[in-house]
Each structure stands twice: as structure tokens, then as C-alpha cells.
Image (cartoon, rainbow, N blue to C red):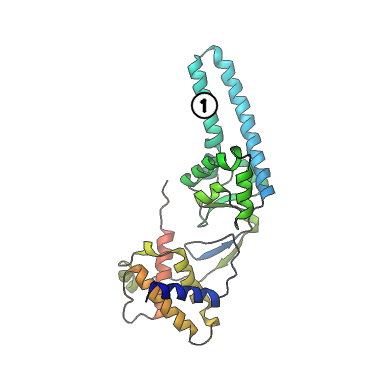
Amino acid sequence: MTEHAAVGAMADARHVLPTTLPPACVVTPEGVLLQFRPVGLSTRVIGRLVDLAMQAIAAGVILGIIGLSSAVFPQGIIIALWVVTAFLLFFGFPIAFETLGDGRTPGHRAVGTKVIGLDGGPVRFRQAAIRAILVMVDLFLTSGFAGAVSILSTPSGQRLGDIAAGTMVVRLSDASIYDLPRFELSPGARTQVAKWDLRQLSDSDVDLARDLLARGSELRPGAQLDLGTRLSDHLVKRLGSRRPSGMTIEQHLQTVVAARSEAGSHRVATW
């Protein structure tokens, strides 16, 4: 199967299979579809103002204490304390709250929002750090213009920091949860799966296989088998291993989805 044919199969499948997913949605490794309503610009501005107010209050208190200590400590130490305080408040504050506080700074809690990864998982330290660094571009260096344009122009309401970090801000109260088909690896399939390079599978590959398994019965007679065969051939090329003899097209797609889901659910988050 040529690469052009594989792309054609995927395009055909997306054309005939109904697509109802909203812009802000994620499919967890366990096969659960989470749908969210993107948070609007005004809500994010209010949350940001709450955080800035808390940071300003904390800065005033800490710098006041440092100022009172200026008669005791050398000027070099006082300057160093100011620098450390500024760093902790503007970078440490959001990183700590988002990483340790379930993706919620005080501002997020005030407006009922939360930061999550695009995979639906919690925010990692690396993601929180990227968001904190790029707030300089989103907010301070451009007076909020860059962040506002990015939020208004992206389907999931992401600022530049969200795009770079792979995160989005959502309202948990608006979440809808749907169970997509879930499959488990049979003992006999594990030997075959061990030969597959699952890293070569894209999210689109797996989502398409899951979608075809879920909605294939809605297709005209013969179309499900045709699309399934073309998709299976495409996955064989991706995985670098032939479909075992005796394994049906449907079983092959189910095994691919199950293997990817199991690998995703056991993935260990790095820093």
C-alpha cells in the first residue's frame, strides 16, 4: 500500500464517519472521551488579575521585610534577595500551584478553571515552566496583545504558552464524559505486540481505528471491510510488522488500539 493510498484511506474514513468532537476535547489513553468548553478571554483575564493581585500583595510584604533588613545585611545580599523574590513570585508561583495544585492557581480557583495537558492528564513541571516563561510574551512584553490574539484565534482558546507547552485551560464543571470502545490485549496477542514499534503510531492513526471500530456498522455494506483493510495495511507499514495470519482485520485494529491504550496508561511522566 502506497503512502498516497494510506492517506486516501484515512481521508475517506474521516469523510464517511461522522465527526462530532468539539474543538476542546481529549481522548485519554484508557479510551475515555472528555469534552470541554474552551474558557473565554474575559474569564482568563479575571483569573490572571486575581493571580497578579496576590503576587503584588506578596511582593509588597516580602520587599517590605527585606527593606527593613537593609540596615542589617550588606547591599549585595539585599539585591540578591530582591532578585530571588521576583523570580519566585513571577515564575515559582504559577509553576508550584499548577504542578502541585492540580493545575489551579488561586486565580483559576476563583473563576472555576483548570490547566490540563492536551492528553487530559495533569500538568507536568516542564509544561508549567514553559507556560510561566512564555507569559512574558503573552502578557508583559506585548501588554497582553499576543495572548489575547492567540486565545481568540485558536479553537481551544490557547495562549502562546499553552500552545508551546501542550496545555489548555478548561472549565471542569462543563466537562462531558463519554466512553469510547475499549479493548484488552489477549494473552496470545502480547507476543505479537512486543514486536511492534508503537512509537510510530500517531494519535490520528489510533483515533481513526477506534472510530472505525465504533461506527463502522453505520457504513454501507462492504465499505467497512474496505476501509478496515486499507487502514490495517497502513498500520502494518507504521508498525513495521505484518498482520499475523489468522488475525482478522477487526482483531488487528482492536489489538492496535488496545496496545496503544495500554502503553499510554503506563507511560511515566518525566519532569
Q: Identify the image quadrant of the C terminus.
A: top left
Residue located farthest toward the bottom when viewing the structure as drawn: 221
Please say if 204 is above or below 77: below
Compared across the picture, whether 116 is left or right of 152 comes to left
Q: How many marks?
A: 1
Crowding around mark 1 (Cα neighbors within 10 Å: few <14, some 14 to 19, many 20+) is few
Q: Identify the image quadrant of the N terminus.
A: bottom left
Please say if 115 is above or below 25: above
- Tell me the residue at 62%/41% (across/down): 106
- Tell me the residue at 50%/66% (across/down): 31
- Tell me the residue at 48%/87% (across/down): 222
In the image, 266 versus 253, the foreground residue is: 253
- From the top left corner, tell me how far across and down residue 46 is, in percent: 68, 43
Q: Is residue 102 visible?
A: no
Q: Is residue 269 visible?
A: yes
* Three-letter amino acid code at the position of disc 1: Val
- From the top left corner, tell me how far across and down residue 199 is, in percent: 37, 61
- Tell me the residue at 62%/25% (across/down): 61
Name the residue carrying label 1: 83
Please say if 152 is above or below 145: below
- From the top left corner, tell me how far across and down residue 83 is, in percent: 52, 26
- From the top left corner, tell me how far across and down residue 125 is, in percent: 47, 44
